[in-house]
Amino acid sequence: MPDLSSLYSEASLAAHDVDAVFVFITIICAFFFVLTQGLLIYFALKYRRRKGVVEETPYISGHTILEIIWVIVPSLLLVAIFAYGFIVFVKMRTPIPGATEIQLSASQFSWNFKYPNGHTSLNELRLPVGKPVKLVMTSTDVLHGMFIPAYRQKQDVLPGRYTYLWILPKQTGKFDIYCSQYCGSGHSLMRGTLIIMSDQEYAQWQAHEAQEAAAQATQPPEKKGEEAVEHAGCLGCHSIDGMAKVGPTLKGVFGRKVELADGKTVTADEEYLRESLVDPNAKVVKGFQPIMPSFKATLKPDDISAVIAYLKTLK
């Protein structure tokens, strides 16, 4: 259930500016709604038909001054609305000096973030409060849309080119990330979380992640692979208990005969599993859609080897 209270908060710098434009337009609309409806009711009552009284309808040919007013005033208001909105738009699109660049790669159906220190995360973006951030975004497959409702900010993410989104968090907390473009059958599953932390909490999180990375280097490959599978979100589409989900189950996958969509049959050996991770559409399993994203950019060769080692244990 989405947190609707975030729609009324000013969680970012852009949220305050966008809300101000919205309130400005709402006040103008409300004023003219009350004015026109009030005059309508007033004249309807004033000139209503009275029983026993016969009055001729006056002939009115026009009123030059009134016509000039109701043309000029609405025109000036429209110009004011455009000018205010344009100022806010330019402010939202103007780079914030000193912003930290974070790479974002979108794919069906996940958000992959890469921090300046090389740390990667899937569907979760952690940022310190009060620090400007520039998201450098691209897509590996189809058109997506980076949408943070609490920030009132949205930007299309395109395959084959880079787009940008500037954000300046003003409040700590958790906020939803959605895809604003229908990008396939799993579009509704393409959700993420934006976690804004204090400077101290963010520094502690970075230190913890560094320790985790060091600890993983000494783990058995099966354990490292299990954590990689969970971290990469594989279990959202694949089960490990034999039940088919969006993708085939991973239980007993290694060494199994796999029937492909083109009618061929292959054995799920190390090379087949590696290829399925880096180029999942090369050999699509019969009965399933070719919607799995490539993990070529997010999983290092050692991670892929660890994942394969883990899959071998799923008997």
Image: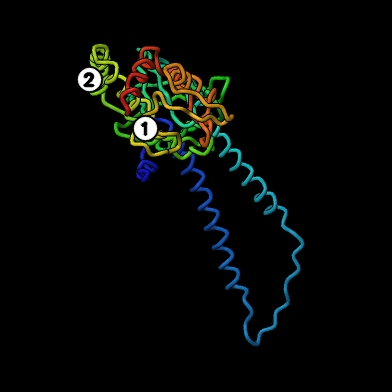
Q: Nearer the viewer, residue 14 or 288?
A: 288
Residue sitting at x 25%, y 15%: 220
Residue sitting at x 70%, y 83%: 54
**Disc 2: which residue:** 204
**Disc 1: which residue:** 235
Q: Position of residue 174 (x, y in %)?
A: 32, 34
Secondary element type, mark 2: helix
Residue sitting at x 44%, y 23%: 268
Residue sitting at x 42%, y 27%: 256
Query: Residue 299 appears in which quarter of the rendering?
Result: top left
Secondary element type, mark 1: helix
Mark 2 vs 1, N-terminal side: 2
The residues tagged by marks 2 and 1 sit, at their Cα atoms, a distance apart of 28 Å
Q: Nearer the viewer, residue 193 or 304?
A: 304
Left or right placement of residue 264 versus residue 54 in this view: left
Rendered view: 96 above or below 123: above
